[in-house]
Amino acid sequence: MQAILKILDNVKNVKILVIGDVMLDKYIWGDTSRISPEAPVPVVKVSSESYTAGGAANVALNIATLGAKANLFGWIGEDDNGEKLTQTITNKGVVVVPGSISKEKNTIVKTRIVCRRQQVCRLDMEDSPDCFQVTPHDIATKLAPAIKEADAIILSDYAKGIITTETIKAIQEVARPDTIIALDPKPRPSISYTGLSVMTPNRSEAIKLAGITEEDYKEFPAEIVCKRIYEKYAPKNLIVTLGADGMLLSEKGEVISKVPTYAREVFDVSGAGDTVIASLCVALATGASMLDAIHFANTAAGFVVGKLGTATATPDDIIAYASHK
């Protein structure tokens, strides 16, 4: 508890830059009691709609909610959805880096239809990843000041186009040598993640990064996964989130620690990975040790997965949750 309080005492002194795939999460809330006569699908009677930040925008929102300074770069369309997203995050203290809003791009929107606390389906509206690429020139001209000012940089990769091998290298070249650079990856053959301070894949992402097939093992092969990821990408720290099994920390390919989950109940895991990397980097930027940062992130994640829909945790939420953990 003392470590959590110390982190929260210092959050206002740190500045985190989030670079990645920005989205608007839309929720359509309703109820269903019959099947359509036109097709074997439920008829949803809509009662309300709500909007919140998704993807990299949710990472930035988590940071701002904790009380740290959050800057965000990711393409936002000059459209109604982009306006809703910008208003949502700026009202909570997130600063959108100039140049993020573009007439040539459409805001990515994920629409979830929820009935009786159960997600019925999700509708995705997005352009080709080619439309969202960021060039080294963009980084040198639009992002360089924000990169140099940041205590930590989070690369929020949802495979929508912004995070590529080239953009990672360009960001590393501009950043100060002591800057924490963390990545929440979406593994794919076309990208290489090297030289990072922290990587935070979930179980399935870690399996893909390691290049193995999980079906070949009865249990999650932690030692093999960590060793292979280090051999391929050499992250300074690897943190694998394992859902109900908690998290594990690896350094130089060796498993250092396993931390059980702090979740008491799970309603919705949407955005849990965003909360983990946001709270982890906030803690590290305050000077916390890696293990203290993991415990802090685990506490924040335990709180948000107990909420329906994409959620964030305030300092008061974290203190209250940790007190009854």
Image: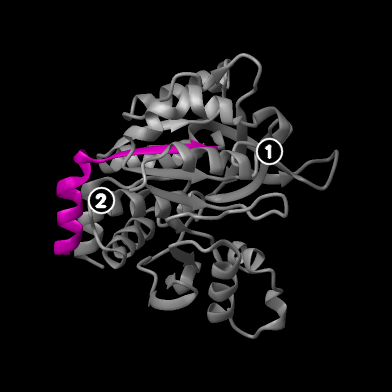
* Residue in front for this viewpoint, 233 or 163: 233
Position of 30 compared to 53: left or right? right
**Is most of the magenta stretch helix, strand or loop?**
helix
Residue type, numbered disc 1: Leu
- Residue 29 sits in which quadrant? top right
Residue depicted at x 58% and y 66%: 206
Residue 314 location, x and y as percent? 27, 45
Magenta residues span: 1-20
Q: Which residue lies furthest to the bottom in this view?
A: 218
In the displayed structure, does residue 3 sit left or right of residue 92?
A: left
Which of the two residues, 118 or 294, is positioned nearer the viewer here?
A: 294
Q: Earlier in the sequence, mark 1 or mark 2?
A: 1
Q: In which quarter of the image is residue 187?
A: bottom right
For mark 2, what is the residue?
Answer: 317
Which element carries disc 2, helix, strand or loop?
helix
Q: What separation in Å lies between label 1 and label 2 (alpha carbons)?
A: 31 Å
Q: Which residue occupies 18% across, 62% down?
A: 3
Q: In which quarter of the image is residue 302?
A: bottom left
Query: Which corner quadrant holds the N terminus?
Result: bottom left
In the picture, which quadrant includes the C terminus? bottom left
154 or 84: nearer the viewer: 154
- Residue 123's disc is 1
Observer able to see residue 85: no
Looking at the picture, how far across and down is residue 251, in whole percent?
43, 71
Q: Which residue is drawn at 51% across and 44% down?
A: 156
Q: Is mark 1 on a helix, strand or loop?
A: strand
Say whether residue 285 is visible.
yes
